[in-house]
Image: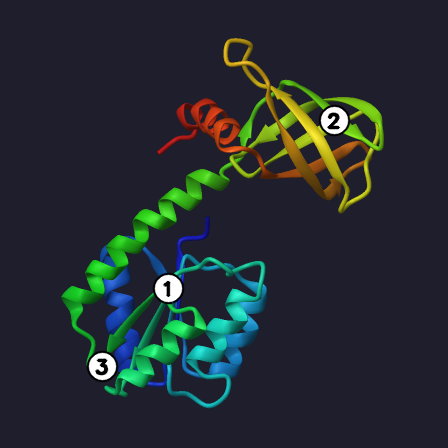
Amino acid sequence: MDKRALIVDDEPATCHLIEKVLGSVGMDSLSVTRSAEASDILQHGKFAMVFLDDQMPFPDGPELTRQMRDSSRNRITPVVMISDDKRPAAMVRGFQAGASFFMYKPLDRERLLMIVRATQGAIEHEHRRTRRVPVKSRVLLKHDGHVIEGESVDVSMEGVLVKAQRIVPVGSSVDIQLQLNRAMGPIVGVGSVVRVAAANHMGIHLGRLSLPESQKLQDFLLPLIPD
C-alpha cells in the first residue's frame, strides 16, 4: 500500500504542521490548497491517509469524502476531517460523509500524532492483507458446469492470479478450489474474475470465502508476508 498522505487545506500553516507530524513517523505527504485539484488527485492516486478541511470551495471536505467512499481507489482510506467550525453540526456532517476522525483548529499536535499512529496500524494491516505472495499451487475452477485446471501465480488474502487452461470472462462467478497446503486441505469458495492478464492469466477476487476458509488462507499467507 502507498504510504503517502494527502493534505487538503487552504492554510499553509496547517499543511506544514500535518506534514511535520507525518514526517516524524516516516510518512510522505502531498499538500494542496485547492479542493478541485484534490478531487482530481484522488481520482487517480491511492493514499494511506487523507486530511480534509471541511470549509473550502466546492468540493468541500465532506463532498471529497463522499467521492472517496464511492471510489475504488480510496474507498477505505482513513479520512481526518479538520474544521474551524466548533458547532456539533460540523462534526456530524463530517462523520455522515464518511470521515474516520474529526479535529478542530488550531490542531493539537499530540492528538494529531495519536490519530496518525492509530491509523498506521490499520494501514499496515491493509498492506499485509493485500500483499501478493508468489505461490505455485494447483487450482481447480468450475464455471458453467466446466472444470478448468490451473496453477496459482501469486496469492493474497483478497485474491489469486491463476494461469489456466482457458480464460473465463471478466465478471464471471467461479467455484474455486485452491490447494495451497496438503496438510491444511484445499481452500474452497466462490470467487469472481476481475481481470484478465496476458493470454491465459486471470485475477480472481476471493470476496466470498467462509470465515473458516478465510482463516485457513490467512494462516497460510501470514508467515510468508514480511513485516
- Name the mark nearer the viewer: 1 or 2: 2
Q: Which residue is rendered at x = 57% and y = 74% of the image? A: 40
Q: Tell me which numbered mark, 3 or 1, is placed earlier along the sequence.
A: 1
> Does residue 199 show up?
yes
Q: Residue at label 2? A: 141
| Image position, residue 180 (x, y; %) | 57, 18
Which amino acid does the dot numbered 3 rest on? Lys
Q: Amino acid at mark 2?
A: Leu
Tag 1 residue: 29
Q: CA distance from mark 2 to mark 3?
A: 54 Å
Residues under labels 3 and 1: Cα distance? 20 Å
187 versus 128 height, above or below: above
Residue at left offset 66%, top offset 37%: 191
Residue 126 at x, y percent in the picture: 43, 45
- The residue most toward the bottom is 57
Residue 6 at x, y = what percent?
41, 67
Q: Position of residue 61 (x, y in %)?
A: 42, 79
| In the image: residue 12, left or right of residue 150 | left
Q: Quadrant of the C terminus?
A: top left
Say which quarter of the image contains residue 71: bottom right
Name the residue tied to disc 3.
Answer: 105
